[in-house]
Amino acid sequence: MAVINVDAQSCKPYDVVILGASCFTGKYVVREALKFLNAPNSPLKSLALAGRSPSRLSEALKWAGGPKHAQKIPLLCADTSDPDSLARLASQARIVLNCVGPFRLHGQPVVAACVESGCDYLDICGETEFMERMEASYHDEAAENGSLVVSACGFDTVPAEMGMLFHSSHWIGPSAPSRVEAYLSLESEKRIGANYGTYESAVLGLANAHKLAELRRSSPRRPRPKGFVIEQQKELGLWALRLPSADSSVIRRTQAAFTENPRGLAGEKESIEHAKMRESFWSSVKPAHFSLKIGSKSLLGLLPVITLSVFLGPLSRSRVGRWLLLKFPSLFSLGLFSKKWPSEEEVASATFKMWFVGQGYSDSSVALNPDTQVVTRLMGPEIGYLTTPIVLLQCALVLLDDRDNLPKGGVYTPGTVFGPTDLMQRLRENGISFDFISWKPLSS
Ligand SMILES: NC(=O)c1ccc[n+]([C@@H]2O[C@H](COP(=O)([O-])OP(=O)(O)OC[C@H]3O[C@@H](n4cnc5c(N)ncnc54)[C@H](OP(=O)(O)O)[C@@H]3O)[C@@H](O)[C@H]2O)c1
């Protein structure tokens, strides 16, 4: 096992390397990164793009920034099936932003290379089993080598994590939430779906659900909701259905880390002010049960999700079923996923709202039943290709700006690492709003 001198990280030629820059999401990440490259007050001074094909990387760069960047941004060859190429990549980067999915197929060698070289790693994964497997396999080595590994730094799962922390801050004094239901509503003037990469990751995730169960076998089983129950949320005017995304499991991991470390995780060279701020931040956080639902103004709007839920489970279990699912994404999701990428216009026309409806106690030391409701809301642009790059880039900029105040290394959730930083403020400045909506007593 190599022990890395953390100061060596500052001598690396690239602050950030985007791996998978030529993929559909990757090119939007490149576009977002170029906004901050050498911009006033930006810590991002050097950037390289990496992937299998220099010509596809070059096309992505041209799409993202026009010809003016063509000569200035180095293109590095890296293939997730070639460990030497990944070792070379990690040795040149302070942070690798990994966009190559499905992560269950491609992610592990990238994490291994970053941990080995002691560089930081962020990705846009939404695959629960991959994230928990990386934590189980690499946490100790990453902690020793000074490599911060944080998955799910995209729409999965930062809006839910930061949204929960924001929501928690509105339960003041002795009040405390017991459960928070989040309702995600996707809005667009045009009909918009997601690219095939996300669909493939979801199909393979379900096909391998037994591996997640195996991984968790050592911990006690918790009851989980079965089937799909449609709820009418009258206050929000939404019909809603539970969304089996990674958000709930990542929030549970953040809350577990918080229980183990009630003052949060100290940075290796943390300033006294930051340590005080971190401790005060975590002392005000009130954990609660979290679940996420997808909502729509009409029952008909939920039809694509219902159709996909009906087919995904049974078909993903057999080889032929998986072949059918992957061959005809549009058919099984009524156009929600497609091999035909959403156009720039479709992406630009979409937005999201995520409502957090929390119920709990006005005074948690005396109340027997929940007697209070608090509603907060996040809003932002299209989730997969606008919000995800914004979130990923802002997480990277926090690392570049504030590295000494963050844990030396380890495999963590976004909330654990970025909760007490200025990430929320940065997201606000980049188009994602966090709003308090209402507080009201509940009638018993
Ligand atoms: N967190 C979120 O909310 C969020 C949002 C969007 C996407 N995602 C995730 O991001 C991932 C990418 O999605 P996408 O739709 O952008 O996928 P995509 O367009 O299908 O791209 C996949 C990319 O993987 C690259 N790749 C495949 N095999 C490789 C290898 N052996 N070595 C290096 N690169 C390799 C391909 O590179 P080439 O160009 O060389 O073919 C391709 O660019 C998915 O897992 C998706 O779930 C997450």
Image (spheres, rainbow, N blue to C red):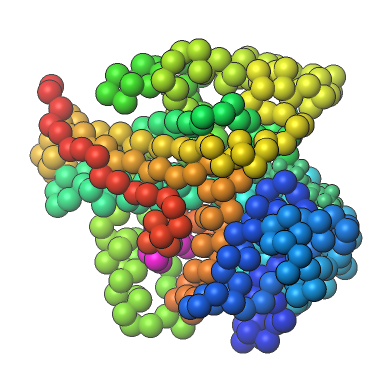
Q: Residue 126: x percent and y percent?
A: 61, 43
Q: In which quarter of the image is residue 262?
A: bottom left
Could one spot residue 137 in this view of the protein?
no
Residue 410 placement, left or right of 248: right
Q: Relative to residue 29, is residue 352 depicted above or below?
A: above
Query: Could you tell me which residue is drawn at 57 percent across and 57 percent down?
Result: 392
Q: Relative to residue 299, is residue 385 depicted above or below?
A: below
Q: Residue 121: x percent and y percent?
A: 64, 64
Farthest front residue in view: 67
Q: Does the magenta stretch include residue 102?
A: no
Residue 366 placement, left or right of 385: left
Query: Could you tell me which residue is drawn at 27 percent across and 23 percent down?
Result: 235
Q: Residue 294: x percent and y percent?
A: 47, 27
Q: Residue 86: x percent and y percent?
A: 81, 65
Tag count = 0
Q: Is residue 418 magenta?
A: yes
Residue 333 placement, left or right of 440: right
Image: magenta residue range:
416-424
Q: Relative to residue 126, is residue 224 depicted above or below?
A: above
Q: Relative to residue 72, is residue 164 depicted above or below?
A: above
Q: Locate the N terminus by quadrant.
A: bottom right
Query: Could you tell me which residue is drawn at 62 percent across and 51 percent down?
Result: 124
Residue 52 placement, left or right of 29: right
Could one spot residue 357 in this view of the protein?
yes
Query: Could you tell me which residue is drawn at 30 percent across and 46 percent down?
Result: 435
Q: Quadrant of residue 316?
A: top right
Q: Locate the C terminus by quadrant.
A: top left
